[in-house]
Amino acid sequence: MVLLVSLALALLLVLLSGKRLRTAPGPFYLCAALLSLAVVVCAFAGIRFPPFVTAWIWPVLARGALAGALFVLVMVAGAFPNGSMGARTLMPIRAPLSILAGIFTLAHNVAYGKTYFVALFTDAASLSATTLLAAVCSIGMDLVMLPLWITSFPVVRKKMHAKAWKRLQRWAYLFYALLCLHILLLTIPNALRGRPGYGLTVFVYTAADTAAHAAAHAAAHAGADAATHAGADTTAHAAAHAGGFPQPDLSGRYLQRFRRRQSWDLRGYHRICYDSGRHHHGHPHHCI
């Protein structure tokens, strides 16, 4: 049920504030950071909450349920057909959703790392086999996530070369695989014991990870075909403007839209050069 609540909250965020999240994500990042800071402070202070908060609110924010739900939306976004409502709704905000999920993931790892990461390096024998593997997986996941998360911010992405940014973003699929493995290690034992809700968690994350990798495989083939006709530089340049963290969809209408925009910009660019009369040594492209 906690996962369903988290998915409902993530969907409400998308449906009610998707446009604002795309155009002005700063306030959303600030709210996520403040909530995450509160989670970390409460975890280190050992604050005890009422049963309702412990059962429903704390798991959503501190145990990574909301972060996981946001990542589920990011993973399945690329699986929707081009032009569908799901693609139109989720594709433009994949990067902001990833950044929000990254903030909550960091809070989760700090809040629970004070127990499990410390035990991993000081008393690994006290951890069960699945918990030990989950902790190791979590460390690997953080190492992969941090550069992806940082370079998802537009101010950082704009300073990177397009091809370098695209190569880095390919690591997103390793992160998704580690995320799924981390969650399965913690949920499958409880699902096998028949505890309610854990079977649904296993199904949702497995399906989301499968959809993400299937979409990546399809996009890779479509991107390769598009690059044959449009050129590798066009594809790389489109990737630099597509948004961060998840591998961008370079197929179908998204690449076509970029081609039209690039063609229009190029024509407008030369028109400005010629109209300005500043022909440096007869080369109008030196203008501006």
Image (cartoon, rainbow, N blue to C red):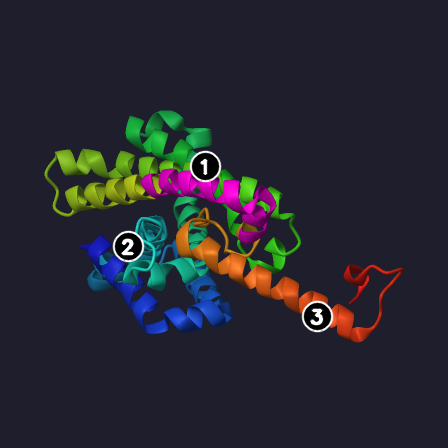
Q: Position of residue 32 (x, y in %)?
A: 43, 64
Q: Are marks 3 and 2 in contact (CB under 8 Å)?
A: no
> Which quadrant does the C terminus fall into?
bottom right
**Span shown in magenta:** 214-238
Label 3 Cα crowd, 10 Å radius (few <14 / some 14-19 / many 20+):
few
Q: Earlier in the sequence, mark 2 or mark 1?
A: 2
Instruction: Evaluate if marks 1 and 3 touch, with contact meaning CB atoms under 8 Å apart.
Output: no
Q: Residue at x 34, y 53 (%)?
A: 77
State the CA–CA distance, disc 3 to disc 2.
58 Å
Query: Does residue 142 show up?
Result: no
- Crowdedness near tag 2: few (<14), some (14–19) or many (≥20) residues, C-alpha within 10 Å: some
> The residue under label 1 is which amino acid type?
Ile
Pointer 3 or 2: first along the chain: 2
Query: Which sits in the foreground, 38 or 174?
Result: 174
Q: Position of residue 156 (x, y in %)?
A: 62, 55
Name the residue that disc number 3 marks.
271
Q: Position of residue 3 (x, y in %)?
A: 23, 53
Q: Circle 2 — which element?
A: helix
Residue 127 is covered by the magenta coloring: no
Could you tell me if the residues under marks 2 and 1 are in contact, i.e. CB atoms within 8 Å?
Answer: no
Q: Which badge, 1 or 3, is on the more N-terminal residue?
A: 1
Q: Which residue is mark 2?
A: 59
Q: Is residue 195 left or right of residue 257?
A: left
Mark 1 or 3, closer to the camera:
3
Q: Is residue 273 left or right of residue 43?
A: right
